[in-house]
Amino acid sequence: MSARVLIVDDLFPNVKLLETKLSLEYFDVIAAMNGPDAIAICEKGLCDIVLLDVMMPGMDGFEVCRRLKNNPVTAHLPVVMVTALDQPADRLRGLDAGADDFLTKPIDDTALFTRVRSLVRLKAVTDELRSRAMASRDFGIGDPLAIATAETGQNADILLVDDRASSAERLATALSQHHSVTVETDPHQALVRATEGSFELALVSLDLKDFDGLRLCSQLRSLDRTRNIPVIMMAEAHDRGRIIRGLDFGVHDYLMRPIDRNELIARVRTQVRRRRFSEVLRGAVQASMELAITDGLTGLHNRRYLDNHLAALFSEAVLRQRPVSALMLDIDRFKSINDTYGHEAGDEVLKAFADRIRTHTRGIDIVARYGGEEIVIILPDAGVEGAHTIAERIRERIEEVPFSIQRDTRSVAVTVSIGVAARNAEDAGPADMLKRADAALYRAKAEGRNRVVAAAA
């Protein structure tokens, strides 16, 4: 997978060395010699990953990373800190600033390419979510990037898979200050727990007794129920090859034993924040999709949804030579409710009206607010007689119980008129059927309201 890599280093030889290595692996490389230039490049969206030197004059790498991760525009960018510092305290400082990983000088080529590819893959998924989530702002949901960036990464449900009792106890104790930790020694049971639970991160020891921990990581990454859970490998010095393989197939991070307590806490926080960042974006995407096809007041489908789906449903009915019917519903004298009790009371009636209709329709039916107080119901596999029966049942349900208004302090009697039409062989499309249903509704109104009228065949 190719990507645009930003190298940030104040020493030109270091930039050229990394540029040469990455270019040979078909990465596009750009460079910045200081922190402010690097931030400007990132804010313009010109890179996919940042290789950031720590020791720079003026603004050091820690400060650059902190600014990138605290900015909603750049928080999603993976940042790998490149440093000669290899003490746990140095790594902790970088992780606290938001770094996604470290590469220690002199840089190992395999570690460089593996880490860059792994983080670029994760970013590609996030980018897709970001672009879709931004549409949610048009629906007044708020800025999902700002919400996601504010996430702290604390109070997560964590699954710890380790069959070394002393190790598991020490790790669980360290994490329990900020998270809820479930310890599992059996890898088979761990997979069951992961699929049935709601964990936000899994820590997996690679050196489980009589079981390959890397296989468990692979299973967690491949199953639908667990593939969005971040996985951190816990490895020994001799596990280098397996670490690289794990990163290749999508494991998110790793810790080397003996595990430093502070680094453990920081890396867990980083992965939980990243997961929640993605979850916020997914939620925004889902909310915007629902708003695009849902009427905000009644919760029914809107006119756009009806128009987009009715043609396909009608064509299928023609192809299969199956019936399909339409009900056109209109609340009787709805204007008088608004005029007498106010528009808020009218909204209460419309919401309750929609709720009652839902109880008398099937999952395969399309129920949509057509405009104002009019609702259209499309009934697949229902002829005119069956549709008439359903319409009459809805009419009775609306009439028999008054509607509560003004926060349940008053009630008002409501009735509905309904026009019914079924597909005819002569119909050029669903518009013809809806036109007949509308004409039948008009007749129901003219004949005294609170009735069901079927269009002539």
Image: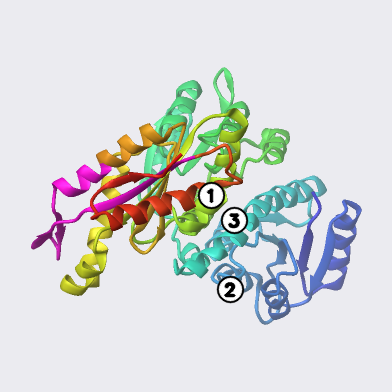
Give the mark nearest the N terminus, 2 or 1. 2
Helix, strand or loop status at disc 2: helix
Q: CA distance from mark 2 to mark 3?
A: 22 Å
Which residue is disc 3 drawn over? 129
Helix, strand or loop status at disc 1: helix
On screen, residue 438 versus residue 321, left or right, reads left
Q: Amino acid at mark 1?
A: Asp
Viewer-nearest residue: 381 or 93: 381
When asked about the image quadrant of residue 205, the answer is: top right
Instruction: For label 2, count other residues whose C-alpha is less than 10 Å away and answer few (under 14), some (14-19) or many (20+).
Output: some
Which residue is disc 1 drawn over? 432
Question: How many numbered marks does the figure carry?
Answer: 3
Answer above or below: position of 206 versus 433.
Answer: above
Viewer-nearest residue: 409 or 450: 450
Stretch of the chain drawn in magenta: 394-422
Nearer the camera: disc 2 or disc 3: 3
Contact between marks 2 and 1 (CB within 8 A): the answer is no
- Residue 275 appears at what percent x and percent y? 52, 51
Q: Amino acid at mark 2?
A: Arg
- Residue 166 appears at what percent x and percent y? 43, 32
Q: Residue at x 50, y 51 (%)?
A: 306
Give the mark nearest the N terminus, 2 or 3. 2
On screen, residue 13 versus residue 160, left or right, reads right
